[in-house]
Image: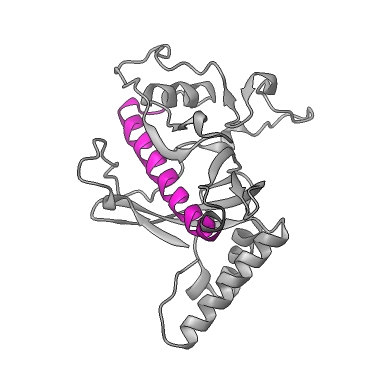
Amino acid sequence: MVWIPFWSKKPDDKASAPTSDTPAKCPVDHSKFAKKSQEPAKCPVDHDKLDPTTKMPYNLSATNKVPGQKLDLPTERTLSSIPRGDEESAGVWEYPSPQQMLNAMVRKGHKDTPEADVPAMVDVHNFLNEGAWVEILKWEKKYEEESGKAPRLLRFTGRPNELSPRARMLQWMGLIYPSKYGGPPPFDRHDWTVLRYDSAGEKREVRYVIDYYAGPPENGFPTFFLDVRPALDSVASVRDRSELWSKSVWEKALGHGGRQE
């Protein structure tokens, strides 16, 4: 698990984080989407019109204001450092503009979203994604060295209402050992599917699980913990996680720090 203080951003970053004392959390209240009628639950989104790589609508407006919008929000999108798709020609992923972010949140029912806070929400969103990709690159380093080809992000899925097995286990352990493991559950979860090249040059899809935890504010800025690891759904991923765990235990036994996961 890696700790990421938001105030560690580069000095030239334009947007600033909210300065509230309220602990950091996902800006979207996903509980509002739960259907409370007796009818069978179903997704209100037409999936035929969704981009399969992002689970977002193809036609999400980048420039149009929402009804009643008072502030002019930036419409420019920022390029990430994350390679997109399965070919170099696909370029990199683009982050949503503040206007797109507001449009998406209003579309999902969050009409009371403070317009002035949206640029900071986008900034935190981008910052955490970059941090998650850095952690994935650490896991993928040996495969990149073997193949000579860098990994790429194929697609991602947000699963905010689903605790990962590890997050669930930590919550259980918190009930038994609250002084060591006690704490709130992650405020968000993503599953990222990464394209990996093996030593023979063959392509393989690897799923990563990312749990996002809120930390205590520092210097008026929020802090976050990212738990990034390959999902235990393949022999290679089980081996990678076992090797990292055994290496960490061995280094601690020898009195070395070791990388935290």
> Position of 168 compared to 185: left or right?
right
Locate residue 240: give its quadrant.
bottom right
Q: Nearer the viewer, residue 213 or 55?
A: 55
Residue 151 coordinates in the image, percent (x, y): 53, 47
One can see residue 184 in this view: no
Indicate whether 32 appears above or below 220: above
One can see residue 107 in this view: yes
Which residue is at 63% across, 48% downward?
A: 201
Indicate whether 251 appears above or below 201: below
Q: Is residue 125 magenta?
A: yes
Locate residue 171: give its quadrant.
bottom right
Which residue is at 46% across, 88% downward?
A: 254
Instruction: State how many labels appear.
Output: 0
Residues drawn in magenta: 113-142
Q: Nearer the viewer, residue 36 or 30?
A: 30
- Identify the image's colour scheme: rainbow, by chain, secondary structure or one colour: one colour
Residue 147 coordinates in the image, percent (x, y): 56, 53
Which residue is at 57% across, 21% downward?
A: 57
> Position of 176 compared to 92: left or right?
right
Q: Main secondary structure of the magenta part?
A: helix
Residue 255 coordinates in the image, percent (x, y): 42, 86
Residue 217 coordinates in the image, percent (x, y): 32, 55
Question: Given the current orientation, which residue lies at the most extreme left position?
Answer: 11
Which residue is at 35% across, 20% downward?
A: 75
Locate residue 56: give its quadrant.
top right
